[in-house]
Image (tube, helix red, strand yellow):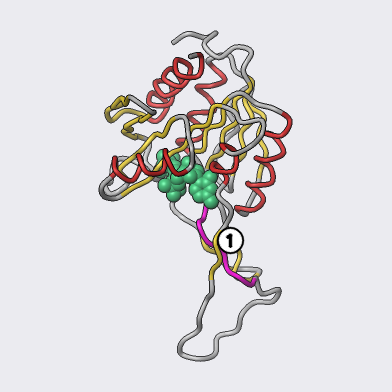
Amino acid sequence: FDHNLLSGCHVVITAGPTREAIDPVRYITNQSSGKMGYAVAEAAAEAGARVTLISGPVNLPTPTRVHRIDVVRADEMYDASMAVVGEGCDVFIATAAVADYRPTITSDHKIKKSTEEIHLTLVKNPDIVAAVAAHARRPFTVGFAAETHDVITYAQRKLENKHLDMIATNDVSGENVGFNSDNNALTVIWPGGHKVLPLAAKRQIAKQLIELIAIRYKR
Ligand code: PMT
């Protein structure tokens, strides 16, 4: 692993889940542990990059030489990402499992148990990685895709629709990969090529991903 691979580069990474409040004690979230994103941050720092990690709520230590910004909600992750990209960065890697929807209304008091059925209305959150790819100071933009079926087809569609430079896709239907696991397997796709990174520890996969990103970014 080349420790000067990304020297002089500012790499920004989103990681973990987001939490969308229903009321002061309840929220909507997902199974992301942050392990994949933190491994990518560590690998980028080991490759000599200056690293900013924008993190949802997780229980992980901050990797060495990584600047961490903590957020909770998707709109906070969006604002933090736009602020950092606006100042200028070279590579943006979106590993976060951002909640696609949030409750339309967040109650400011604990919702009381009452009728047999209650309804929760949700509204779409802004798409962070798509906004980064559309930014005037667009960095080399890498997305992730978590799919349970037709993995490559959906990932290819996200690469095109979000105008990304690269997408790393994982099948999250299995037990030993994706959300929360210490291991992962990725198919990395870019316009005109792809590479399969077979099952390995997330830290190992992260290094391989950083190598692929460095090659494509330098072109
Ligand atoms: O955190 P771990 O437990 O280690 O698990 C790792 C992981 C499974 C979360 C990770 O490998 C992964 O796949 N991350 C992406 C999860 C996801 O939400 O994918 P998606 O297909 O819904 O989103 C596609 C891309 O758009 C992602 O890069 C996502 O960060 C981004 N996105 C999505 C919605 C949104 N509002 N803003 C975004 O930026």
Q: Relative to residue 128, is residue 185 depicted above or below?
A: above
Q: Main secondary structure of the magenta part?
A: loop
Is 101 covered by the magenta stretch?
yes
- Amino acid type of the residue tagged 1 in the rendering: Glu
Task: Please give the residue where the numbered disc 1 appears in the rendered image.
Answer: 20
Task: Say whether residue 200 is left or right of residue 78.
Answer: left
Query: Where, by quadrant of the figure, is residue 158 drawn?
Result: top left
In the picture, the quarter occupied by the N terminus is top left
Q: Give the range drawn in magenta.
A: 97-105
Is 20 covered by the magenta stretch?
no
Task: Say whether residue 196 is left or right of residue 134.
Answer: left
Q: Residue 105, image x and y in percent?
A: 64, 72
> Dot 1: few (<14), some (14–19), or many (≥20) neighbours within 10 Å?
many
Residue at 46% x, 22% y is 213
- Along the viewing direction, whichever of 3 and 91 lies nearer the viewer: 91
Q: Relative to residue 34, is residue 103 depicted above or below?
A: below
Q: Residue 63, image x and y in percent?
A: 58, 27
Q: Residue 82, image x and y in percent?
A: 68, 40
Residue at 62% x, 25% y is 51
